[in-house]
Image (spheres, rainbow, N blue to C red):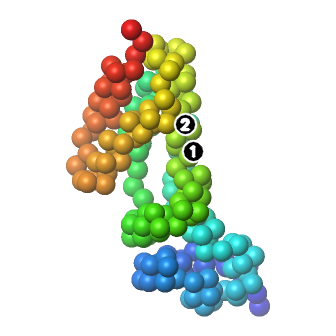
Amino acid sequence: MRTPSKEAHEKVLHATFRLIAERGIEGTSMDAIAAESGVSKATVYKHWANKDALLIDLIRQQSASYPAFDSGDPRADLVALLTHLARKVKSEQLAKIWPRVIGYAASNPKFGRALQEYVFSPRKAMILRLLKDAAETQGLRADIDPELAADLLIGPVMHRRFVDEKNIPADLPERVVDYFWKVFRRD
């Protein structure tokens, strides 16, 4: 009897987590994933063209989706988004392999671009939309470099999460947005 596709899909994802945690990404092959999961290689390749596609799918499924942050108040929405990022906790499984994912992205530019596109770009697009709305309605300068602005807003929160995730001040997102507004408001 054949394993239903959804069940096979889950088996492959669980096997991928186990193998990457144990062997690293470079040490994990599609053949090993198929063997560990008990799913045929043909079925694995039916769902994912290669290991990078499988890894992106795994990360995307384990990453929480973002709320809309569309209250009509871009400044408040930026604070809410940064608060969400400050508190967002990766799944335990993803947290175990995340350093390997970042290392792999640094050494594999094609994967790094895919990770950027499918995981980080939606968050950045949301920030860029909020900044555009704030320029139109709340007195932010319209000439802000959107890429730099997103980095300036996200950077302090991500840095704190990396350095000391358990001790992020509750008011950090609001303080970051306050400083940002002071620097980039229209005179």
Residue 104 in the image: above or below residue 145: below
How far across and how far down the image is residue 56, in percent? 58, 64
Q: Are marks 2 and 1 in contact (CB under 8 Å)?
A: yes
Question: What is the spatial separation of the Cα atoms under label 2 and label 1, in whole angstroms?
Answer: 6 Å
Residue 92: numbered disc: none
How far across and how far down the image is residue 164, in percent? 24, 53
Residue 152 in the image: above or below residue 110: above
Q: On the image, numbered disc 2 is attached to which residue?
A: 126
How many residues crowd around disc 2 within 10 Å: few (fewer than 14), some, or many (20 or more)? Answer: some
Quadrant holding the N terminus? bottom right
| Residue lying at 52% horizontally and 14% vertically, measured from the top left | 137
How many residues crowd around disc 1 within 10 Å: few (fewer than 14), some, or many (20 or more)? Answer: some
Let me know if residue 29 appears in the view. Answer: yes
Badge count: 2
Name the element at disc 1.
Answer: helix
| Residue lying at 44% horizontally and 79% vertically, measured from the top left | 24
Let me know if residue 94 appears in the view. Answer: no
Residue 98 in the image: above or below residue 15: above
176, 165: nearer the viewer: 176
| Residue lying at 50% horizontally and 31% vertically, measured from the top left | 146
Residue 173 in the image: above or below residue 137: below
- The image quadrant of residue 103 is bottom left
Q: On the image, numbered disc 1 is attached to which residue?
A: 122
Outermost residue, top direction?
Answer: 187
Residue type beneath disc 2: Met
Name the element at disc 2.
Answer: helix
